Amino acid sequence: MRRVLLLAHRVPVAGSFTLNDLAGGGGRMDEIARAVSTMFTLSNGLRTDAEMTILFVASPPPKARRIEIAGGRLRYLNPDERSTAALLKNALVRSIPEEEDVESSPGIRVGPAEPEEAIRRFAGHPGAFWLTERGEPYRSSPLIDGGYAAILSDPTDPSEAEATLLSDLSLPRISLGPRSLRTSQCLDVLNQEADLREAVRPATPDG
């Protein structure tokens, strides 16, 4: 399984932005939407072995929200960022009056979140790592074998509190190179590396 926890710091948590201004008033929802598209879409289908959690932590209130996307159940996702942003916006709007998780569309669940608890829970996945420029080279890391569990940030660096928590959790740090890549580019590189390793993995006795 390929898993990602994406920390989104500027998107209005209530979904109070227009699809005509995703980069500005949308708090870089354009890049969040591209990351979702990159994580799940293939040329002629979707990755069913992928899961993505987006933690929306912008302030002021309402409280943080968590969107969970499951590739095996996902429907209505298209490659363009506007329609993807519309799916995410709808999820955020649907979640505001609710105190429990709701399924806003097939494969997309949304609900309130406690950021520290959400990060700690994701860090419990086997082989979880923090994707950062200041880490070990990804091509020599065994943590991408057989899938991965990566924590990364939107175009804004993790907050001081988030960075401290990730450090305290003693998560391995993996780097894709010395330059800062866009979030969606990071997922492209991770998926390609996982695809390449999967292609050369020895077949099991069952075939």
Image (cartoon, rainbow, N blue to C red):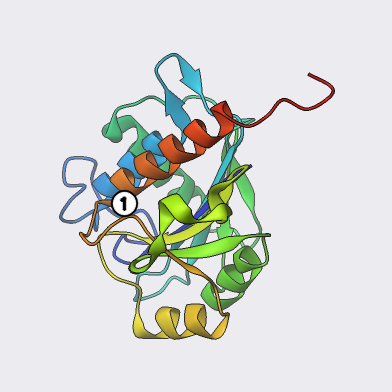
Left or right relative to 134: residue 141: right
User: Splitting the image into 4 quarters, where does residue 108 fall?
Assistant: top right
Residue lying farthest to the top in this orientation? 44
Residue under the point 45% across and 86% down: 164
Residue under the point 64% across and 54% down: 101
Residue under the point 49% across and 62% down: 65
2 versus 142 height, above or below: above
Disc tally is 1
Give the x, y percent position of residue 96: 49, 58
Q: Is residue 96 visible?
A: no
Residue under the point 44% across and 39% down: 193
User: Splitting the image into 4 quarters, where does residue 78 fall?
Assistant: top left
Secondary structure under tag 1 reads helix
* Image quadrant where one finds the N terminus: top right
User: Which residue in the protein does label 1 denote?
Assistant: 183
* Of the pair 185 and 177, the residue shown nearer to us: 177
Mark 1 residue crowding within 10 angstroms, few (<14) / some (14–19) / many (20+): many
User: Splitting the image into 4 quarters, where does residue 145 fall?
Assistant: top right
Q: Is residue 163 visible?
A: yes
* Of the pair 199 and 84, the residue shown nearer to us: 199
* Image quadrant where one finds the C terminus: top right
The amino acid on which the numbered mark 1 sits, given as a three-letter code, is Thr
Give the x, y percent position of residue 191: 45, 38
Left or right relative to 69: residue 154: left
Left or right relative to 135: residue 45: right
Give the x, y percent position of residue 11: 31, 59
19 versus 151 height, above or below: above
Residue lying farthest to the right in this orientation? 206
* Of the pair 47 and 179, the residue shown nearer to us: 179
Give the x, y percent position of residue 166: 49, 77
